[in-house]
Structures are given as structure tokens and as C-alpha cells.
Image (cartoon, helix red, strand yellow):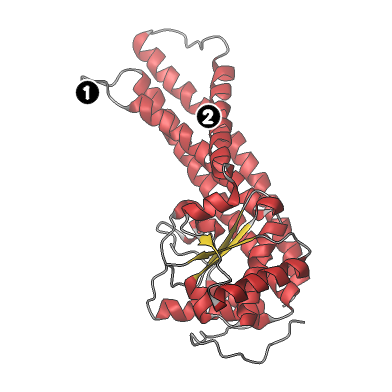
Amino acid sequence: MRFFEFQRDARGETRRLLFAFALTVVLLVVAVNAALALAWGLTWGFWMPGDLTYPRHYFAVNTAVTLLFVLGGWWVETSRLAEGGGQRLAEQMGARLAQPSGDFDEQRFCNIVDEMAISSNLKRPQAMVLARDQGINAFATGWDEDDAVVAVTRGALDHLTREELQGLVAHELSHIGEGDTRLNMRLVGMVFGLEMLYRMGQHLFEPDTRDRRMAAALIGLAIMAAGWLGWLAGHALQAAVSRQREYLADARAVQWTRSRDGLGGVLRKVLTQRREGIEARSTGSLVQHMLLVANESGQVAHWLDSHPPISQRIRRIYGRDMGPLPLSREEAPATVAV
């Protein structure tokens, strides 16, 4: 695997996507002003025939209110996600602290977290376990290294070899070291801000207590249309950024472990579970980007998926297509990455 080349490509693509995200906000402001100008023109023509004029500072106020909702929503949602730290968010997702003294597999997991933290030159994150999830999965969360958590499912502890568990932990540590956990929380906040603009339009469009719609309903409809398009573009860009960060974390995991069969074996066993119909515990769309593999596929289009296809990730790691692996913990000779 050409992991340095893949890392460089993923970082470059992320920068381009973040620029596109900022451009989306600018275009949203333009779209809202255009929609409100059209709505005002139609309303003016109906109520006050004559030359069309706009109120003083009309577009400046529209721009300020739009940015207030988008940036204010971003701040509110990001603060909510960051409140209480990575451990609290992990607990909300169903994780508990690992118990190395009472379980051999959890002891092995804690030891690997210590080893990979040293290998990656990062502070040791808190080790946690999703004890009720039999699917093979993991996630990392936390605002920075001091707040970081790495959690794995019971299925990962039961089915992965030591080498595979190293690859899984290395992947999650890459997300922490590259700042992906913080970046993802900010992107979630921005998408929430875009959604708030749509909700404002929806509120203006709703009928009153007598089931009548006033003139503001036309303005609300215009804001809803612009807000929905902005939310859709923001969600698609968030998913695209997440996919690139997954490629980067995969390359980092191979670099740190010097083995394709570590993370590659994990992904191949995930394929086995999916073919056997083993259901992973649903975590909700909000935190899909935090997982090693998404457990909810896109319902609208694949460009809204938070993760690349597993087969494509395996192909990048090995340089060729590889089939699923049996769900056993028999140690196999490693394929050294070059």
C-alpha cells in the first residue's frame, strides 16, 4: 500500500472539500437573498402596484439573519457535542469503561491501546467497550488528545486477532491524531446550522390558528427552498470529507502497524458478518461518521454515505480485491506493507 501517497491525496482532497463547504455557505446567502427578493417582488406586485422598491438595508438584514442562523446553529450544536467531553458522548452511544481486571479480551484491548499510543506518539486515550454490540466496529471521539476516547464493540473483541485489533485501534488513533474527531463535530454543527435555516422557513410557511397562510408564507417557502438546497449540499460535502478521512486513517493504520492484514483483516471480517446477516447495533445518522464502518447505508444516494464501500477500502489496502475472512481468532502470517 502506498500509504504516504494516499495520505497526501486524502489531505489535499479534504482541503478542497472544506473550501467547497465555505463556498456553499456563501452561495446559500446569495440564494436566500435571491429567493427573498423574488418573494418580495411577488408580494409587492399583489399588494402595492407600481414600481418595485425594497426596504432600506433589506439585503444586509437578510444576509445577517441567514449567517446568524447558520453560524449560531453551528455554535450551539458543536457546544452540545463537546459538552462533557469524549467520554460522555461515548456513554451516550452505549459505551462503558473497559474492565481489564475482569475480562481477558478487554485486558488485551487495553494493552493494545497502550502500545499503539506509544507507536503513534499520542497520549493514551480512554479505552471503552460497546458491550451489547456483536457487530465488528469501533469509534473515536473527543475534542482533542486530552479528551480522547477509543471504543470497540464486543464483536470486535470476540472475533479479531491481536494483529487485527492493533489495526483497528491504529485506525481510530489516526482520527484523533489528525484532528478528525474535532473536525467532524464542527461539520455536524455546520450542517445543523443549515438545517435551522430550513426550519425557520418552515415556521413562517405554517398556517395560523385559523388555517390561513399570511403573506409571510411566500417568504417562508422561499427560505425553505434555499435552506433545503443548502442543507443537502452541506450534508453531501460532510459525507465526502468523512470518506476522505477514512482513507487517510486506513493509510495511517497500515503505516503504524506495518501490516496489511491488521486493518485489512478487520474489514474482511466485517464483510463476513454482513454476508451472514449479523446485525450491528444502530447508532443513528448523527454519529455515523465516527464509526470504523457505517451501520446505516445511504437511503437516498451513495454520495450521502459517510464511509467508502468496504470493498474499495480493502482494495486500497491490498492493491487487489480480497474476499471475506472466517470469524475466527486464529493467528495468520502477516502480509508486511511496503
Q: Which mark is residue 91?
A: none
Q: Quadrant of residue 284?
A: bottom left
User: Where is 271 relative to 27, above or below?
Assistant: below
Sequence-wise first label, 1 or 2: 2
| Quadrant in which the C terminus appears | bottom right
Circle 1 — which element? loop
Q: Where residue 44 sits in the image (x, y, percent)?
A: 41, 13
Q: Which residue is mark 2?
A: 69
Q: Which residue is mark 1?
A: 211
Give left or right: position of 92 versus 107.
Answer: left
Give left or right: position of 78 versus 116.
Answer: left
Question: Residue at coordinates 43% horizontally, 72% vertically from top-left?
Answer: 134
Q: Where residue 142 sits in the image (x, y, percent)?
A: 62, 52
Q: Where residue 304 sits in the image (x, y, percent)?
A: 49, 56
| Quadrant in which the N terminus appears | bottom right
Q: Nearer the viewer, residue 61 or 53?
A: 61
Q: Residue furthest front?
A: 101
- The answer to whether the residue labelled 1 contacts the one labelled 2, judged by CB atoms less than 8 Å apart, is no
Residue 318 visible in the displayed image: no
Q: Nearer the viewer, residue 201 or 226?
A: 201
At label 2, which amino acid type do we have?
Answer: Phe
At label 1, which amino acid type do we have?
Answer: Asp
User: For the residues marked 1 and 2, what is the alpha-carbon distance in whole angstroms?
Assistant: 27 Å
What crowding class fits label 2: few (fewer than 14 Cα within 10 Å), some (14-19), or many (20 or more)?
many
User: Where is 299 relative to 163, above or below?
Assistant: above
Question: Residue at coordinates 44% horizontally, 60% vertically from top-left?
Answer: 298
Residue 47 visible in the displayed image: yes
